[in-house]
Amino acid sequence: MMIIIMIVIAAVLVASDQLIKVWAVNELSGGISKQFIKFGDSEIVNLTYTENTGAAFSIMSGKQWFTIGFAALALILFAVYVIKNYKNSRPAMILSAVVISGGIGNLIDRIRIGYVVDYIEVRLFRFAIFNFADICVTVGIFLLALYILFFYRPAGKEPSVPAEVHIK
């Protein structure tokens, strides 16, 4: 049942990512930048269209087949690892679906159009322009790491309790 929930979550997030990217192409391409979040006179976040032919921060730019192959392999290995090791943990599975959906969303772009559509520009400080799929990957991995490090308990293993200390 958990696999079905994962698939539904991933499908909804991938569809959302692709719909937002269609909007970005239609509304922002051609050098248009729209204010999105503004505080006083300061622009915090703008929506600015860009095409990323590389991986994160445009690393490996122009190496399309490498980025496609690496992303596909990483997604498969991540999915197998999570299902094998955390299949009895609902939070781990849900967060993994979020991570996988982000990877799939960007992989679809790479295969379909040869680049990833990015559109979120943080203006508060200098940062790369990114998209919803990137947010899914980053937030999903961060929360999954926190969950595994601090909250996950394998089935059948109780947290260790220190032996009682007697002071004489």
Image (cartoon, rainbow, N blue to C red):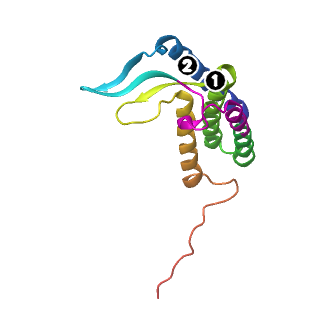
Few, some or many residues within 10 Å of mark 2 (<14, 14–19, 20+)? many
Residue 124, by quadrant, is top left
At 47% from the left and 30% from the top, the residue drawn is 129
Query: How far from the left and from the top, in percent, is residue 3?
Result: 72, 34
3D distance between C-alphas at marks 1 and 2:
9 Å
Query: How far from the left and from the top, in percent, is residue 75?
Result: 70, 37
Which residue lies under the disc numbered 1? 109
Q: Amino acid at mark 1?
A: Asp
Nearer the observer, 165 or 45: 45
- Disc 2 is placed on an element classified as helix
Which residue lies under the disc numbered 2? 21
- Residue 147 in sight in this render: yes
Nearer the observer, 86 or 59: 59
- As displayed, is residue 81 above or below residue 150? above
- Residue 1 in sight in this render: no
Q: Quadrant of the N terminus?
A: top right
Position of 22 with respect to 157 (left or right) is left
Q: Which numbered disc covers residue 23?
A: none
At 36% from the left and 36% from the top, the residue drawn is 125
Check residue 60 for magenta coloring.
yes
Bounds of the magenta segment: 51-73
At 39% from the left and 36% from the top, the residue drawn is 126
At 72% from the left and 30% from the top, the residue drawn is 4
Check residue 152 for magenta coloring.
no
Residue sitting at the far bottom: 168
Position of 84 with respect to 50 (left or right) is right
